[in-house]
């Protein structure tokens, strides 16, 4: 299985003003992927997608305001909240070795060193020292796995499998 060629970079969470701006919760490390002239894929809650060009982008606190081509006013913009914004992964900066986009990790199966299936990565928590994987276990529980090399032994993006060596008591 090949990794998804698209990655979510934000979610439309509201509208702003009367000119058609939408408010974005940004999931990218940088606002650079939202530069005017770039295209984004807007996927609504029904899974329908369309390519839209960014006309204007401006930060607003921790969020971002976007004006998209074809969204001339507030009433048109009000149809967009809840939609995800995606781009082709090829547009994202190249990663250093042994680093991954969160979108590639979420949904990955987690297995122990002896091949026992532990669960699925549900989300990630960013901490000061290292990220932490939130894993929904096969028995319906949840465990937190630190993203450190002594615990996470292998990440296979093609097979969507993370092999871990859990410390005693985890």
Image (cartoon, rainbow, N blue to C red):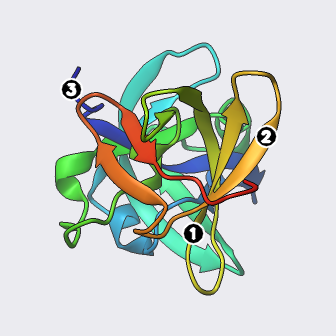
Mark 1 vs mark 3: give the one in front.
1
Mark 2 or mark 1: name the one nearer the start of the chain: 1
Disc 2/disc 1 C-alpha distance (Å): 16 Å
Residue drawn at point x = 36 percent, y = 32 percent? 160
Disc 1/disc 3 C-alpha distance (Å): 24 Å
Q: Where is residue 153 in the image (x, y as percent from the top left)?
A: 36, 55
Mark 2 or mark 3: name the one nearer the start of the chain: 3
Q: Dot 3 corresponds to which residue?
A: 2
* Residue 40, image quadrant: top left
Q: What crowding class fits label 3: few (fewer than 14 Cα within 10 Å), some (14-19), or many (20 or more)?
A: few
Q: Dot 1 corresponds to which residue?
A: 131
The quadrant of the picture occupied by the N terminus is top left
Image disc number at residue 142: 2
Image disc number at residue 113: none
Count of numbered circles in the view: 3
Provide the secondary structure element on which disc 2 rests: strand
Residue drawn at point x = 26 percent, y = 32 percent? 3
Residue 3 vertical placement versus 124 (above, below):
above
Residue 40 visible? The answer is no
- In this rendering, would 5 be left or right of 41? left
Residue drawn at point x = 17 percent, y = 50 percent? 90
Q: Where is residue 39 in the image (x, y as percent from the top left)?
A: 30, 47
Residue sitting nearer the eye, 5 or 138 = 138
Q: Where is residue 135 in the image (x, y as percent from the top left)?
A: 66, 41
The residue furthest right is: 141
**Do the residues under discs 2 and 1 have CB atoms within 8 angstroms?**
no
Q: Position of residue 83 (x, y in %)?
A: 61, 34
- In this rendering, would 109 be left or right of 7? right
């Amino acid at each position: 299985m090949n990794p998804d060629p698209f990655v979510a970079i934000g979610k439309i969470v509201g509208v702003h003003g009367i000119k058609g701006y939408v408010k974005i919760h940004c999931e990218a490390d940088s606002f650079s992927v939202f530069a005017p002239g770039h295209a984004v894929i807007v996927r609504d809650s029904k899974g329908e997608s369309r390519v839209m060009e960014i006309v204007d982008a401006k930060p607003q606190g921790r969020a971002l305001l976007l004006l998209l081509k074809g969204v001339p006013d507030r009433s048109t913009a009000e149809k967009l909240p809840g939609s995800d914004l995606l781009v082709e992964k090829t547009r994202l900066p190249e990663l250093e070795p042994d680093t991954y986009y969160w979108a590639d990790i979420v949904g990955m199966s987690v297995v122990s060193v002896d091949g026992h299936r532990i669960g699925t990565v549900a989300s990630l928590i960013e901490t000061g020292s290292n990220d932490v994987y939130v894993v929904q276990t096969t028995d319906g529980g949840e465990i937190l796995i630190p993203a450190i090399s002594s615990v996470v032994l292998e990440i296979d993006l093609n097979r969507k499998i993370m092999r871990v060596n859990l410390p005693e008591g985890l």
